[in-house]
Image (cartoon, rainbow, N blue to C red):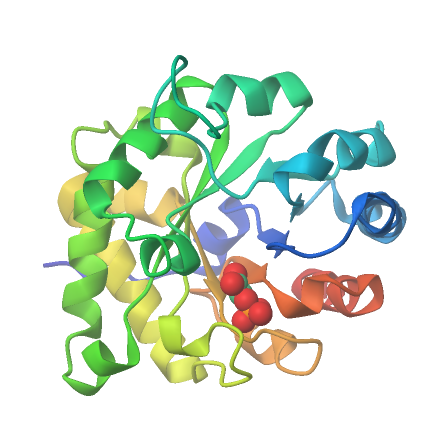
Amino acid sequence: MQHPSQSDTTRLVRRPFVGGNWKMNTDCARAAELADDVANGGSRHAPTVDVAIFPPFPYLHATVHAVGHRAILVGGQDLSAHAQGAYTGQTSGAMLVDLGCRTVLIGHSERRHGLGELDGLLNAKLTRAIENGLIPVLCVGESRAQRREGRACEVLREQVQGCLSGISAEQARALVVAYEPVWAIGTGDAATVQDVIQAHRSIREVLADLYSAPFAQSIRVIYGGSVNANNAAELFACEEVDGGLIGGASLKSDDFLAIVNALCS
Ligand code: PGA
């Protein structure tokens, strides 16, 4: 197994990514307003950083419209594992693209654990995202019990391997992996910098085993779980951390933009 060492050069090659996952919050007017505020404050970073927002499905159109030509990525919080057809209530990758989305979340813990989504299904969703040219943000992370049992790295390996099964390096080149330990999401209990570094290294180790060390070095691995304006700078200072996926703190534009600024400074 390899532990690829990182240099400043490799970090520079990986374009940072910061996303705001609004979950099932806002209403249509608030979503458009928040998108406009994020675009106003965030688009100046667009030359060097991917700034993304993930509004609820019904407000995608309004947020894409609010962002306009400013370089903020809008994304779906999920997509169907199917391309089209008789799948009541589902949203296809092509529909997301049609609406102006450029990215999509896959396998968020609230879908894995709240809705029972397993790696096989997430593998199909990832494939659909890739087919449609969306930047897939694949969420992985261990539960508190799994961490206590010392199984965090093993769980990350299983999830990354399961979700990437049958997907080539060429297909996976736009992939973003979001390390989001279940116990840190929405709890105010962010992972320690040491835990994040260890988890991100083990995710890159799996990518190196599956593909190659250079491929693993090219993939963005971001952290999510109780990131806020106070702890962002410390987390983003680590070479292993290429950005963040932000839940609660993305619902206030000032907080979210402070986090974006922390990534850019
Ligand atoms: P949080 O959520 O920032 O509220 O912990 C992160 C996420 O669910 O992506």
Quarter occupied by residue 113:
bottom left
Residue 124 in the image: state x and y as whole percent: 28, 30
In the depicted structure, whether residue 167 falls above or below residue 153: above
7 with respect to 91 (left or right): left
In the depicted structure, whether residue 255 falls above or below residue 7: below
Q: Can residue 191 be seen from the camera position used here? A: yes
Quarter occupied by residue 264:
bottom right
Residue 56 in the image: state x and y as whole percent: 64, 44
Q: Give the residue drawn at x 15%, y 82%.
A: 150
How many dots with numbers?
0
In the depicted structure, whether residue 94 falls above or below residue 139: above
Classify the position of the N terminus by image quarter: bottom left
In the depicted structure, whether residue 85 falls above or below residue 155: above
Residue 205 in the image: state x and y as whole percent: 21, 57
- Image quadrant of ligand 1? bottom right
Residue 214 in the image: state x and y as whole percent: 29, 43
Q: Can residue 236 be seen from the camera position used here? A: no
Q: Give the residue drawn at x 34%, y 33%.
A: 126
Which residue sits furthest left? 1
Quarter occupied by residue 181:
bottom left
Which residue sits furthest top? 85
Q: Give the residue drawn at x 69%, y 69%.
A: 249
Residue nearer the viewer, 88 or 53:
88
Classify the position of the C terminus by image quarter: bottom right
128 with respect to 147 (left or right): right
231 with respect to 207 (left or right): right
